[in-house]
Image (tube, grey):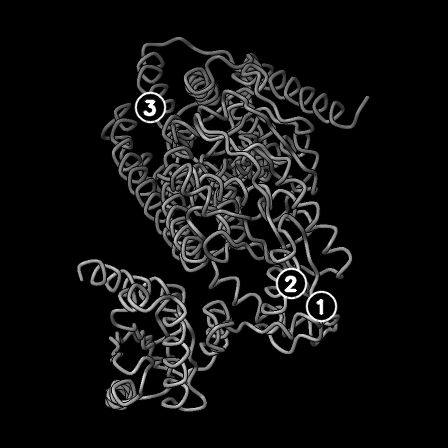
Amino acid sequence: MSSGKWWRLSSKVMEFLLIGVALYFLFQHPLELTTDFWLVLLIAVPLIALTVLFPVTLPSMLVSLELVFTFYLVLAFDTATTLWINFFGELIASLLLLRGTRKMAILLNPAIKVVCLAAGYAAFSFVAAWMFEGQESTGYAVIKLFTVGASFFLINHLIINLMLFFRTSHFNRKSCFDALRWEALVYLVVLPLAILGLVIEPFTAVWTLVILMVPVAILTYMIRSFNRLQWANRINQTCWEVASTKELSLIYQKTFQMAQEFTDSPNGLLLELQADGSYRGVDRDGKMVELNGHPLLQLTSASGAVQIINDVRKSEFNIQGIEARSMMLIPLAGQSKVFGILCLWKLSTHGFRKAHRDQLRFLASQVSIILDRNHMYEELERAAVTNKLTGLYNYQYFYDQLNHRFLVTKQQEENLCLFIFDIDHFKKYNDIYGHMVGDEVLRQVAKVIRMVMEPFDVLLARYGGEEFVAIGRMGTTAAELLAEAVRQKIESHQFVYQEHTVKNITISGGIAHLQDHDALSPSDLLEKADQALYWGAKEMGRNRIAVYKAEYDHRLFVDHLTGLHTTHYLRRKLRSLCEQEKHFPIFFLLIDIRGMRRINERYGFERGNEVLVDASFVLKRTMRTDDMICRYLDDEFLVIIKGCSRSEIDVVQARIHDAFAAHPFPPSDLTVTCDITLIHMQSREEEPHIFERIDSSRAHYDQTENLG
């Protein structure tokens, strides 16, 4: 026989013994069915039952003030009347409270009451024989009350703790002493009221019971109201504590502790909702518990209502490896999502009451609001660092992480590899299929890259346009193998969107390693990977992976016609400029050669190229050495000036206009002028959008040129 079955058997044996002893005492004291007895029976039994039905919740226990009537009967009536009336009162209350449960449980509470009273009478018989020698005298009633009351108190707690010990196979000393302390306070209220009943009994006769019901009802209402307020304050205090944290584990721990304390339930676990719809939690022994799609869990989540299972055996709801007779399920569900379910259980049936459900519903609603708020903050924080289209991290978050990991990795001399992927000929797909299909291609490419790379603890982000970047702690060889796996997976993937099937999607990739390639800074590592992408993969035919080589450094990002930097180089350099606050504000002068299309049409493209070369010469001669000058597509140039005031920029613009007017452009009859548009950037937060603003300015030039 297992230990659990042995303890349950012991509990049942004790129940049989208690009921047997109680019936023995009752039949040893037969009733005298007088008119007075029937009147007392009709008044006292309903009052006792009613008071038991509305108990007072105290820490670690439930008490009811029916003891006022019990001890008044001890003082005012004979032993038989007292025993039988208390038995009937408790029996009716048990029938109403425990209807539908086993008969033993219904008889148990009345039996315990009778046994405790019988023990009290037995103790008083010894005390009376010793103190009063069988004669009633002054103080007789008081001694009788306190002797029977003290015996009742001790025997009642002894029986209850023995029953709990047999049912749970463990003894909680703290709960035991807490219960003793709190019920002792209840006796300080109950015993004086019983004496008050004895004092007024000569004037009110049997109606004394009805009169006593008034203070009992008032006290019950006051204590229950006080308890509700106390628990509401405790719940508010708990919510105040958890509201200041975003750690789910701490919120769950505080909520779980509060629920256990309120229900006096030592057993429980938190079932967290998983992405696949299952529920998973860890019990107090550290064992993983998993439940898949039970209807009761789904009902609890959908309704948001606290569920009480009075008898688990009849509900077909059980958790494997957990022994429970009654259970309570408390949903933690906000407006946005279901977070989990608190599951508490006891080893006895009907272990949870309506008061538990009402208070824990309030607790769950408050905690759910906090979880909802934290979830909303998490979503906002995630949105701030996530690219909406692909679900990957955005460039700003990636660059922050790159800076951090670069420093940590360099200090600890660990591996750090940077990947850059670019979808080949992406503009062609956008032109053929449209931007909606192009966006879907980006989403699916991001999904495939994530699927391949995430198991290797790689941080993945959308870099901009059709480019993706990633950083991971691995060597160059492992990185190349991983990137090649990504390339092959993309090449074999079938891109389908609605009725469109986009074929021949491929990617190119570049890789740079911190130590192997002597990267001096995060920007340098990024630039080396970018050079590998363009010179090693794109220029070599695309749909390939290339690792950085030193020879790529000789192929600087220089425009072959003008000798100026290219826009691509500017994009890389701008990130390093934004790292230092002293460079702000940064001004961008977009310089457009006015009438360049007419120059090409009238003099030919060769002469037009000479104009562009001369224009680049004018800009080099006019600008400072630390100003950056780039050819920004076709007939436009971009000058980047950092750390200047607006008035200084106005002077620079005037100087550029004067330089163009004074320069003799070929042929001699040609006058070349320029338009200058000013774009400025105040902080690094504007960097991801600066080129969109520049492109908007270019669009204005294009419209002007077409109108001309």
Q: Residues within 10 Å of mark 1 (few under 14, many from 20)?
A: some
Q: Label 3 is placed on what type of residue? A: Leu
Q: What's the mark number on residue 47? A: 3
Q: Residues within 10 Å of mark 3 (few under 14, many from 20)?
A: some
* Label whose residue precedes the other's in the sequence (1 or 2): 2
Gap in angstroms between the C-alphas marked 1 and 2: 7 Å
Residue topped by disc 2: 532
Q: Is residue 477 left or right of residue 351?
A: right
Q: From the viewer's perspective, is residue 304 above or below residue 508? A: above
Depth check, mark 2 against mark 3: the one in front is 2
* Label whose residue precedes the other's in the sequence (3 or 1): 3
Q: From the viewer's perspective, is residue 37 above or below residue 235? A: above
Residue topped by disc 1: 549
Q: From the viewer's perspective, is residue 86 above or below residue 651? A: above
On the question of residue 561 being in view, the answer is: yes
Residue 617: image quadrant is bottom left
Residue, x 50% and y 75% (percent of image)? 573
In terms of secondary structure, where does tag 1 sit? loop
